[in-house]
């Protein structure tokens, strides 16, 4: 077993189901020292309660949970509700969660462990953008920034031009990609879309704790979808098993000029300045083997 990794997890759990699937992985990953969970997007308090329900079912009430920012910096939100909060009535969860405390919590944790913390952000970039904008020294104090964010190649036909998290708060996304972080990795939609599982297989495999809480949340997700795509779990897994993906270095720029394209991520490979790393490929079969070897 390798060394443990200190992780902060910033998530919009409660919209797409894959955030909950990623949290389950982090709670079960023996190399993950989960320093805290922060929530972002509409109804962040309810999102924090959902995270609490999964932590409690996993026997991990020790993990700090802090609701964050509910609205983007400038543009209107496209994620106003934590839809899966409907499942909260079935599961014990914390309610004593300090509102809008995420950014200050992240700042304290990163400053307490300079150069050691991996910040894993898998929702709109509002919390992370505010953190980097209000404390300019934080970028240099981060050990690593890992994002599920962006679209960088055209390897999958008919892929959207914009990815949900990048588009969710485009101005925050631009701040995040402009930050001078020493290790800046993005797992984009063009790669994560290759890791999916049909509804029937999910229902067969998600019966054990704490995936049983996730399965309840997934029942709400399956009202409008017939599969789960493991976007966020892949971003979590590569922290501990980097060879699940292949990578390239270059530069990411974020569109902020044309409103219909706000949040589009433009990738330049091997740019003169190459501060960013992106995933280019994934071994989906190995990823699923790894994921279920960790969660059971």
Image (cartoon, grey):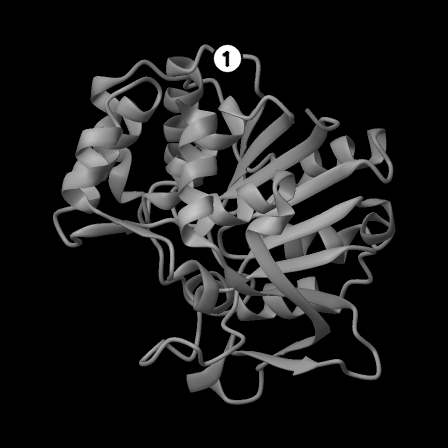
Residue 119: give x, y in percent of width and height: 67, 43
> Can you identify the residue that label 1 sits on?
61
Horizontal arrangement in the rendering, residue 290 relative to residue 1 (left or right):
left
Horizontal arrangement in the rendering, residue 104 relative to residue 155 (left or right):
right
Horizontal arrangement in the rendering, residue 130 relative to residue 138 (left or right):
left
Q: Report if residue 12 is visible in the image.
A: no
Q: Residues within 10 Å of mark 1 (few under 14, many from 20)?
A: some
Residue 21: give x, y in percent of width and height: 39, 37
Quarter location, residue 62: top right
Q: Nearer the viewer, residue 24 or 198?
A: 198
Q: Which residue shows up at 39% across the image and 36% down it?
A: 20
Image quadrant occupied by the C terminus: top left
Horizontal arrangement in the rendering, residue 202 relative to residue 231 (left or right):
left
Q: Nearer the viewer, residue 295 or 22?
A: 295
Q: Is residue 280 above or below residue 158?
A: above
Q: Which residue shows up at 49% across the image and 52% down it?
A: 123
Residue 197: give x, y in percent of width and height: 27, 48
Q: Which residue shows up at 51% across the image and 64% down it?
A: 188
Q: Secondary structure at mark 1?
A: loop
Quarter location, residue 147: bottom right
Q: Which residue shows up at 33% across the image and 49% down it?
A: 16
Image quadrant occupied by the N terminus: top right
């Amino acid at each position: 077993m390798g060394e443990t990794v200190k992780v902060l997890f910033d998530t919009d759990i409660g919209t797409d189901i894959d955030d909950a699937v990623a949290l389950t992985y982090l709670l079960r990953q023996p190399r993950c020292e989960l320093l805290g969970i922060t929530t972002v997007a509409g109804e962040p308090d309810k999102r924090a309660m959902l995270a609490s329900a999964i932590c409690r079912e996993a026997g991990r009430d020790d993990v700090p949970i802090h609701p964050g920012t509910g609205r983007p910096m400038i543009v209107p939100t496209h994620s106003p509700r934590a839809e899966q909060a409907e499942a909260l009535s079935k599961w014990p969860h914390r309610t004593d969660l300090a509102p809008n405390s995420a950014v200050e919590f992240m700042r304290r944790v990163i400053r307490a462990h300079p150069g050691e913390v991996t910040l894993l952000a898998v929702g709109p970039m509002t919390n992370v953008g505010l953190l980097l904008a209000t404390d300019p020294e934080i970028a240099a104090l981060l050990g690593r920034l890992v994002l599920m964010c962006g679209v960088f190649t055209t390897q999958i036909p008919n892929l959207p031009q914009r990815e949900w998290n990048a588009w969710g708060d485009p101005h925050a996304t631009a701040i995040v990609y402009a930050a001078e972080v020493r290790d800046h990795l993005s797992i984009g939609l063009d790669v994560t879309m290759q890791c999916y599982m049909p509804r029937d297989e999910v229902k067969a495999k998600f019966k054990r704790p704490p995936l049983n809480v996730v399965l309840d949340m997934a029942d709400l997700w399956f009202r409008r979808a017939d599969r789960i795509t493991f976007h966020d779990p892949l971003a979590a897994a590569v922290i501990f098993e980097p060879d699940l993906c292949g990578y390239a270095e270059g530069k990411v720029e974020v569109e902020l000029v044309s409103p219909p394209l706000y949040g589009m991520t433009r990738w330049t490979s091997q740019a003169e300045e190459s501060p960013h790393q992106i995933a280019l490929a994934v071994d989906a079969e190995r990823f699923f083997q790894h994921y279920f070897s960790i969660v059971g």
